[in-house]
Image (cartoon, rainbow, N blue to C red):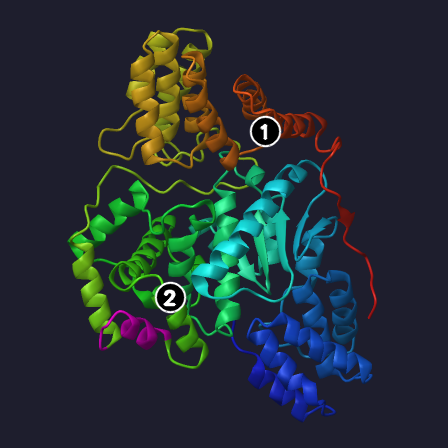
Amino acid sequence: MKSSSTSRLLYALVLVASAPAHAGLVEGRRCLDGYDLRCAMRERDALLAAGASDAASQDFIAETYFHEGRYADALALYGELKRDGYTFDPHAPPFEAAADAAKDFVETDRDDLAVRRAPGIDVILVDEAFEVMAKAVDTYDDLLGGRPDFPVRLDIYPDGTRFIAASGLPAEAVRTTGVIALSKWNRLLVTSPRALPRGYAWKDTVAHEYIHLVVAYRTNDHTPVWLQEGLAKYFEGAWRGEEGGLLSVQQQTLLAQAVHDDAFVPFEKFKHSMAYLDSPADAALAFAQVSTMVRYLVETQGKNALPTVLDRVRDGEDAESAFAAAAGEPDFDSLLASWKSWLRTMPLVAERIESLPVVLDDPADDFEGDPALGNREDLKKFARIGDLLRERSLYAAALVEYDKAMDPEGPSSPTLFARRATCYAALGESQKALDVVDEGARLYPEFALLQVSRARILDELGRVPEATAAWLAAHDLNPFDPEVQDALVKDFLATGRNDLAARHKRYASLLKSGGIVDIGGPAATPLPKSGPG
């Protein structure tokens, strides 16, 4: 998700007018606002070399350090200015909160990429984070016509509380719409999948946020949120070779309803950020809207239209006009009308499905992340009885209780799909078990328990390659499950893929040790507590 920022150039001009003039200060602010960190660093270094000590220059230097991720240096200057009574721009970064959220982070660097995370088991994410970032750099350079010329940093926060503190977003906005990642301040901020009981598609999320960084850099941060999110959502799976614009069942359902009722989320509601929408469903529909707008342009004009749109936005044309012109439309209203007509031709499915709630940081209730059971105490009691019976190997009786926990008028429950499939498998009804779990995974592909349940059943049937794919799908959502890592070691060894077995054996060891044992893992260094000024 892209966090839009108010330009601070006018504020910089006011500060310069009331402070000793430095030729590079206004240019440095312009660079920083335009996501050209390399340029901002050059102007910062020139100010340092010139001995600039006025408050406006120190403010700019501190913020440039912050964008680099040099929290200690930024905080030192910020503290001095704060003690001197300096008045900061209201849009200034949350220096203290962000530094505190990253206070024990360690950093791993490879070429122009860096991953920073908390010590411990989040080290399990590092290798694959670099793989995603490296592929993303190459993929989106080709698709979007450029890449940032400064090192790309990915900050992984171990829990929702620390992500919220670092993001500068209100906690209620994060928890209402499920924002768990941002592209902001020239870096990528994501929440570790271990902060969610079911995990999430964190690799696509890293790619999604990197796209925001590319688009902001390519256009001097002139691209509005709707187009930023449309590009990021459309292309977020391209790094792994996925065709752009594939819609989940939930997105199709929401779009089908919006088309039928002509009840789309107004663009004005997410003008500045998706984080301030009213619900996860509104956010999911908004993402589907803007993603399909990009898909419409690509299908009618080809992928080469996209870099052209970004070039025109960079050169000062408003995004609506540039996008409409690229689509061969006279204006944005005509474009919207054509896009809606095109949507009506799409074979959109409609299912009883809800957004998966984003539940952060150790929920007390096992069903809290379930869209059908989370707020239904009347249904939970049947599900809990079913669990007790299942744990006692009374599978047929458990199925009866699970059926009682299903509301025929409400959304489907991913947890019940998984539980029922397990019971059918235990009763020897393997095909019924697969049918149930496959249906659940079709509706809720990001619910890790469904992938785990499917993998168990396939392994029991001796269908090892299919089981391995399901275990990998579960790993990509929640790599912190020891069962998943152990199963991947076994299945990769069985199919002669010893290199991958070794990787997942190391992951299993990391989990058992809490991240302390990391033999052969990526080198990491703590973030400095202080640095050169």
- Does any portion of residue 59 appear in the rendered image? no
- Disc 1 crowd rating (10 Å Cα; few below 14, some 14-19, many 20+) is some
Residue 328 within the segment the image draws in magenta: yes
Residue at image coords 35%, 24%: 437
Q: Nearer the viewer, residue 286 or 116?
A: 116
Q: Amino acid at mark 1?
A: Leu
Chief secondary structure of the magenta portion = helix
- Disc 2 crowd rating (10 Å Cα; few below 14, some 14-19, many 20+) is many
Rendered view: 15 above or below 371 = below
Q: Amino acid at mark 2?
A: Leu
Rendered view: 25 above or below 201 = below
Which portion, as a residue range, is magenta? 319-330
Q: Which of the image's four quarters has the C terminus?
A: bottom right
Residue 389 within the segment the image draws in magenta: no
Residue 118 appears left or right of 411: right
Measured as percent of width and height from the top left, residue 135 is found at 53, 50
Q: Nearer the viewer, residue 219 or 255?
A: 219
Give the residue number, with chain letter if any, for mark 1: 500
Work out whether mark 2 precedes mark 1 in sequence or the reverse, and give the earlier one: 2
Residue at image coords 46%, 32%: 473
Measured as percent of width and height from the top left, residue 518 is found at 74, 33
Q: Which mark is residue 199?
A: none
Residue at image coords 58%, 54%: 189
Q: CA distance from mark 2 to mark 1?
A: 37 Å
Give the residue number, with chain letter if any, for mark 2: 306
Measured as percent of width and height from the top left, residue 129 is found at 59, 45
The answer to which image quadrant residue 412 occupies is top left
Q: Nearer the viewer, residue 330 or 58?
A: 330
Badge 2 marks a residue whose secondary structure is: helix
- Does any portion of residue 201 appear in the rendered image? yes
Residue 104 appears left or right of 229: right
